[in-house]
Image (cartoon, grey):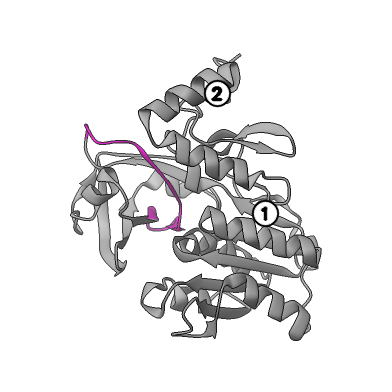
Amino acid sequence: MYKIVDARELTTNIYLFEVEAKRVAKSCLPGQFVIVRTNEDSERIPLTISDYNREKGTITIVVQTIGAGTTMMKSLKTGDYFHDFVGPLGKASDLCYEDIDELKKKSIIFVAGGLGTAPVYPQVKWLHEHGVDADVIIGAKTKDLLIYEDEMKAVAANLYVTTDDGSYGRSGMVTKTLTDLVKEEGKQYNHCVAIGPMIMMKFVCLTTKELNIPTIVSMNPIMVDGTGMCGACRLTVGGEVKFACVDGPEFDGHLVDFDQAMKRQAIYKTAEGRAFLKQQEGDTHHGGCGICGGDK
């Protein structure tokens, strides 16, 4: 059992949980995820780590209520417990393995959309703690749906907030702000990380390809099982079959086939669709755990 030391609603249908998980907190890095179960019989939900505190031994996750499992979570209060809290899983951000002096030479921009702001935060925080500056764009449909603004201000070199309806900050999509920064305001970037809804990441990548900015995306939105066994997060990257949970969740955004991934995600939502995909994809439908070799 894993105690919840802080539980609160950040905005409509988005909740934050800080959880005691000392072993996870001791070894995790930005970009990784955990698998959570509210009780013994509930579904396993993969959630990207939104923050961690090694001294306190806690992990923070941010959850949007979109299904039965996540809706069950919103009833949990400070002092309650998660039945399972497994991790860290997935590969950490590539930035964590680069030489710090080389990182300081980069001009980095993060683009976060909606719930994607939460998993962007630990990466920017990690860079800040290592003396590496990074600019951040965070976007939401309206001002009321923004999250992590104050936290991001504390660690970003420059923070640009944009809302689709213009109710706060800049007006328009995150791609407009990114284009304006480069073409109108003279900013130059040579590394971009984009995390958010699939459609947002697709158009960020189209924009950065035009601007000639290498871009990394996190494909956590398509994960279901978190071990490669269900086949939900199968995608094509540079013509090769990959699985977000065991090969990622981060990939070169300019190589990801977003149209295929979004179409496949829609098909996967029904039992009939899952059966169809399994039949069509055969041996490549799942990737196993990626470690045991059981998928060979």
Q: Amino acid at mark 2?
A: His
Which label's residue is closer to the chain start, 1 or 2? 1
Examine the rendering and report whether any part of residue 203 can be seen: yes
SS label for mark 1: strand
Taking the spot 55% from the left edge, 78% from the top edge, the residue there is 172
Taking the spot 47% from the left edge, 24% from the top edge, the residue there is 276
Magenta stretch holds residue 49: yes
> Residue 88 or 241: which is nearer the viewer?
241
Q: Amino acid at mark 1?
A: Ile
Magenta span of residues: 40-60
Instruction: Count neighbours of disc 2 (C-alpha within 10 A) and say few if under 14, some if 14 to 19, many if 20 or more.
Output: many
Residue 167: image x %, image y %? Answer: 44, 85
Residue 79: image x %, image y %? Answer: 18, 55
Magenta stretch holds residue 156: no
> Residue 88 or 243: which is nearer the viewer?
243
* Left or right: 136 in relation to 184: left
Taking the spot 45% from the left edge, 58% from the top edge, the residue there is 50
Pointer 2: what residue? Answer: 285
**Which disc number belongs to residue 216?**
1
